[in-house]
Amino acid sequence: MNSLVERVLEQPMIYRLWQATHGERKFAPVLAHNDLGRVRRVLDVGCGPGMSTRFFARSDYLGIDINPSYIAEARRRWGRPFVVADATTYAAPAGERYDFILVNSFLHHIDRPEARRVLGHLAGLLTEDGHLHSIEPVMPDKPGLQRLLARCDRGKYWRPMGKWRELFGEFLDPVVFELFPVTVLWITCWQLVYFKGRAKR
């Protein structure tokens, strides 16, 4: 079942249609806590087919994703720089710095050692006034619809709030760390965490 879901969602058009059901609500905390018109340089990690690109029309932007079909679709739709790259091993060119690094629903696809490596590298790419922004699903405490949906998700590393706090806090000082629901047809399907943090100095 999960392999079928993965194959279907790897198609850019299907992925975009799926994200259309809840993508705006997922991104709402980012808009609420930040003035995106003031963002200078963006690194969008695990950008998929570029669903978040439109929020950064006035910024220098780079999106990376491991799926070549996603990247081809993103380039076609947005005409911005996108690179096929594995975020777990991606190394930015020497001297590259970003004031806005977005990691939207990526870390729950990788295990703890890989997540630590990614966050450690990304923290080193932030400017002095820069922040890393991450949106990730939270593993429910109790059985129910949300836990069932978690098991059907492509990401196998959903974490409870405490584990997310611990993971982010190893490399970043939190500015915002908040739980919020995502609903589809008035049903709460997921609880997500929005994290905004500065690199530890």
Image (spheres, rainbow, N blue to C red):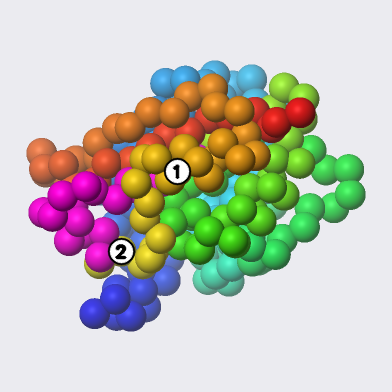
Relative depth, front residue between 113 and 94 = 113
Q: Is residue 149 magenta?
A: yes
Q: From which residue to which does the magenta span run? A: 134-151
Give the SS element for disc 2.
loop
Q: Quadrant of residue 177?
A: top left
Q: Is residue 170 above or below residue 156?
A: above
Residue 70, percent across and down?
Answer: 52, 65
Of the image marks 1 and 2, the number of the one nearer the N terminus:
2
Q: Which residue is mark 1?
A: 164
Q: Nearer the viewer, residue 124 or 66?
A: 124
Q: Is residue 8 left or right of residue 177?
A: left
Q: Which residue lies at the image location 29% right of the left edge and 80% below the top edge?
A: 4
Q: Nearer the viewer, residue 45 or 137?
A: 137
Cα separation, mark 1 vs mark 2, equals: 18 Å
Q: Amino acid at mark 1?
A: Trp
| Residue 61 visible in the current orientation | no
Residue located 57% across and 56% down the image: 115
Instruction: Say what secondary structure mark 1 lies in.
Output: helix
Query: Where does residue 82 sit, x and y in percent of width and height?
Result: 66, 56
Q: Quadrant of the C terminus?
A: top right
Q: Look at the picture and state if 163 lies above or below 15.
A: above
Q: Amino acid at mark 2?
A: Asp
Q: Which quadrant of the figure has residue 135?
A: top left
Q: Which residue is mark 2?
A: 153
| Residue 140 at least partly seen | yes
Q: Nearer the viewer, mark 1 or mark 2?
A: 1
Question: How far across and down, in percent of the image, does residue 22 sit?
Answer: 28, 44
- Identity of the residue drawn at 43% across and 65% down: 12
Please report the residue visible at 11 percent of the width from the left and 43 percent of the height from the top: 187
Q: Is residue 93 above or below residue 165?
A: below
Inspect the magenta stretch and tell me whether residue 147 lies in it: yes
